[in-house]
Image (spheres, rainbow, N blue to C red):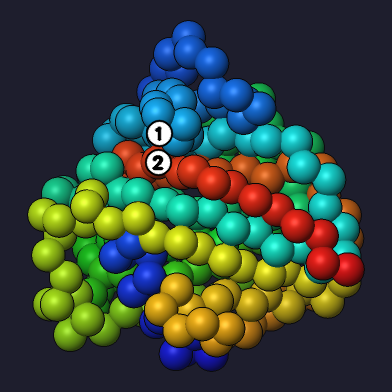
Amino acid sequence: MKRLWLVFCLAILIAPILLFAENVGDWKAAYGDWKMINGRLAQLSLKAGMAMAHVYLPQSGVMQYEVDIRYLGGLEDEYGGFGFHVFVDKPHSSKSWGSGKSDLLWITYDPEAYGGSGVYAQAYKSKSHIDMNLLHKGNAYGLPASYLSKIDITRLNKYYLPVKVVVDGDTGIVKVYDPLVANYYYKFSLGGALGKGSYVSVRTNSLAASFADFRATKLR
């Protein structure tokens, strides 16, 4: 399981303050500086905490999510994070801690809080827009500092990371596919059935990033 999270962290690394009045397609911005740039959904603020946007997407059973992610900036102060809420029932329309009833898959970079390399994969259970909690210790699944020493942070914005995740809403089992090894995945549990969801939320914290080619497929 720890190897799963380590590879997930490494893959993420290499690959609204006020909402500006701009069309973001089917996505609805709740908080942050969200724009559509060359077909990519981008959150541009380096300071917005809890920036989030939602898209209507009915979910049940086994769902496969695919997206490519590009880092734009924000880690210079050694703090930032991003992730996705899946199986969201009713997302909040403005700045919020949680996103309805949902599960959040999250990557955080915060060496001051967690020590070590500062990069950790985390999973949260959201019960409402104000009630969300970690499913494990915050520093349980970290990326070793030796991995970070191989990464040139000044070139992170040159990479596009393909992400593929399968979530079984009936069991809570999640598969994160290795972006470098075909058909290889890492498996973990969110602790039980997720039921049904109506939205997906993408969010960042003190980090600018862009997202494109988002696809969701019901496998079963």
Q: Residues within 10 Å of mark 1 (few under 14, many from 20)?
A: many
Q: Residues within 10 Å of mark 2 (few under 14, many from 20)?
A: many
Residue at horizontal 83 percent and vertical 76 percent from the top: 171
Image quarter of the C terminus? bottom right
Q: Is residue 126 above or below residue 134?
A: above
Give SS at disc 1.
strand
* Residue 184 relative to residue 82: left or right: right
* Residue 64 relative to residue 23: left or right: right
- Of labels 1 and 2, earlier in sequence is 1
Quarter of the image where one finds residue 29: top right
Would you name the residue on which mark 2 appears? 210
Residue at horizontal 45 percent and vertical 73 percent from the top: 179
Would you name the residue on which mark 1 appears? 43
* Residue 8 relative to residue 59: left or right: left
* Residue 198 relative to residue 67: left or right: right
Q: Depth check: 164 or 189 in front?
A: 164
Farthest residue in the top direction? 21
Where residue 56 appears, as percent x and y from the top left, is 75, 36
Residue 207: which numbered mark, if any? none
Label 1 close to label 2 by CB (< 8 Å): yes
Where residue 115 appears, as percent x and y from the top left, is 24, 73
Given the image, on which type of amino acid does mark 1 rest?
Gln
Front position among marks 1 and 2: 2
Where residue 149 appears, as percent x and y from the top left, is 12, 77
Q: Depth check: 126 or 198 in front?
A: 198
Where residue 60 appears, as percent x and y from the top left, is 87, 58
Q: Is residue 169 above or below residue 49?
A: below
Residue at horizontal 44 percent and vertical 90 percent from the top: 3
For marks 1 and 2, give the CA distance: 6 Å
Given the image, on which type of amino acid does mark 2 rest?
Ser
